[in-house]
Amino acid sequence: MVDTENSIKVLEPQLANMIAAGEVVERPASVVKELIENSIDAGARNITVEIKNGGVSYIRVTDDGKGIPASQVRTAFLRHATSKISRPSDLNNIVTMGFRGEALAALSAVARVDMFTRTRNSDIGRHICIEGGEVTEDSETGCPVGTNIVVRDLFFNVPARSKFMKKDTTEAARIEEVVMNAAISNTGIAFKLIKDGRDRFSTLGNNSLQDVMYSIVGKEIVDDMVLAATEFSGIRIGGYLSTPNTTRSTRSMQEFFVNGRPVRSRVLTAAVDEAYKGRLMVGRQPIYYIIIHMHPSLVDVNVHPAKLEVKFAREREVFLAVRNAISAVLDSIDMKKAAKLNELRRQEREEQKATLTGYGSPSLSVSRDYVTDLDNRPKSKVASKSYAGYDLSSLIRQEDEKREKHKESDQEHIPVFAPKYKAPPTAGYLYSPLESDLPVQQQIIADFSNFSSAPKSDTERSNQRDELDLKIIGEVFCTYIIVEADKSVWLIDKHAAHERQIYNQLKASGIEGMAQYLFTPKMVVLSRTEKQTVLDNEALFGSIGFDTSDFGGLSILVRSAPNYIEPDDIPAVLSELAGKIIEQKSADIDIFDALLKSVACKSAIKAGMTSDSRELIKIAQAVLTDPELQNCPHGRPTAVELTKQQIEKMFKRIV
């Protein structure tokens, strides 16, 4: 007896198309991507995308391409109907964006679709309307040359798929990403995106990648990126990549384009990571938009239903080409940076010599030479006695006296080691008495300025180590302080130590929720996912003082911010906080604690910055006497100990 219920049968065309739509038409952004690719293949010079409600209720893609002949309009909606390929060998040489002939068939199976199209050789256009795979209208109409496709009520007949749609703002952000990626890889085409009746994004189509990048990520970020352009083994590589100074906490601003197609590739990602290896802090990601061109036969674009992934015939050559191209660009940046740094240090040494002349403390002059440039110090000074053997309190007192002597009588003395915070009101801020507490803020600033010598309670003192007799040997790489203390040598990371001190002060200050409005709202450029994360979590960011709104493109407008953040640090802080939420895939984080960590990091003395002897002494004394300063807020150690016994074992003095 035959089991008719489980017997094998051929699916109805409509059902087959609906199944195919599950792969090709995943969400509104997938629709826009497929229609844009068809417009590019049609030779369009202008493409306009209009959406409403995140594209779920309305999508329109209009182009000025060659159009579809009236006799072929119905055929275009049949499954596997395409003009791009005709024989198996064509799959080895695909030069078009689309080629499978599935997009229109799958789309018309799960939405209401209207197409208006006309070729240049026709005086009249054609209009066809399809709902759920059924043609409801097919007639002549007047329309301009090109194709205009309107998609309404996506997944109206597949309610289960509708449940998986995200918020309208999230779906709109993904559509925006599709349009922007198409603009980067097709600079000769003018793109425009209209969202809910408002222009959100546009490019000129003037073949200028720089102009497109300005439209997408903003001038501020592009100006800190460098252009890559090289060729290796027949593989051409171009695009923009950020210097090590401009990074993000996520990979959200990293895009690859192969032969005009935005793709994902582990090979390409690994190549870029290798090029940046050793140049970035752990956990930081570069920004890059890398465009690769190679012979179509060397890349297979037919390995993913949505053509988002590719496979290379010669992966090693591609890897080496990308890695070497980016490494060459970054090496040139390092050389320029080193030359500039050497010149700045030379000028600094000249200024130091002029400043320290007549101070009556030759030992201090020697120590500054040791700190700023160990390799280029004069031989006559090598044998001189450095300040390492001097009494610390005496040295601090001498420098304080010199500072008091030379300061202006009408200015308040601020210790060199104080963070960059200034007493309010700060530049760029408009103080609001309803949302800020001026006396509290001033007290916080005062605490920051004197945190290393502020009196501590008996409880705090009981938790601290006894003060040590320290010898500051010097500083290496303008980052690590070398200290001799009680038969040990300590290496102290001055940035990590200072960061922890600021974090502890902020944590104990009770400043949560203190906000102030900016004199001029600040426009901040974020990645697409970062921006959407901020907008989707408006209440969460508002709880710590941020008032933000959408400003189009990749920008948001910030009207207020926590009053202990400098205006210039707002973009980096917002990016980092959004990155934390993205990383955890949830808004369930202690955003105030994450904010304090970000603020502390931005405000601390930076690695590579030259510090004077007083700063080094205060950092060393604080780290080696306060148990709460043993790790930075992110968990990294602030100091590493090397005992005398360990050193003697290294030199084989003891076994």
Image (spheres, rainbow, N blue to C red):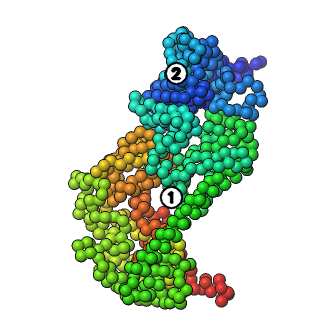
> In this rendering, would 332 be left or right of 545?
right
Q: Residue 112, relative to residue 379: is it above or below?
A: above
Q: Residue at x 48, y 63 (%)?
A: 634
Q: Residue at x 64, y 35 (%)?
A: 307
Quadrant for residue 539, please give it: top left
Give residue 265's position: percent from left, percent from top.
65, 45
The tally of labels here is 2
Question: Where is mark 1, residue-wise?
Answer: 245
Q: Which image quarter is the C terminus in?
A: bottom right
Q: Residue 622, relative to residue 593: is it above or below?
A: below
* Along the viewing direction, whichever of 149 and 459 lies nearer the viewer: 149
> In this rendering, would 474 be left or right of 595?
right
* Along the viewing direction, whichever of 590 and 514 lies nearer the viewer: 514
Q: Secondary structure at mark 1?
A: loop
Give the CA separation, mark 1 to mark 2: 44 Å
Question: Where is mark 2, residue-wise?
Answer: 148
On the question of residue 590 being in view, the answer is no
Give residue 544's position: percent from left, percent from top.
35, 53
Q: Residue 157, relative to residue 233: is it above or below?
A: above
Q: Secondary structure at mark 2?
A: strand
The amino acid on which the numbered mark 2 sits, given as a three-letter code, is Asn
Give residue 237's position: percent from left, percent from top.
64, 46
> In this rendering, would 423 be left or right of 594?
left
Q: Residue at x 38, y 47 (%)?
A: 523
Q: Residue at x 55, y 86 (%)?
A: 379
* Along the viewing direction, whichever of 126 and 619 lies nearer the viewer: 126
The amino acid on which the numbered mark 1 sits, given as a three-letter code, is Asn
Crowding around mark 2 (Cα neighbors within 10 Å: few <14, some 14 to 19, many 20+) is: many
Q: Residue 314, relative to residue 81: is it above or below?
A: below
> In this rendering, would 401 be left or right of 480?
left
Quadrant for residue 67, please give it: top right
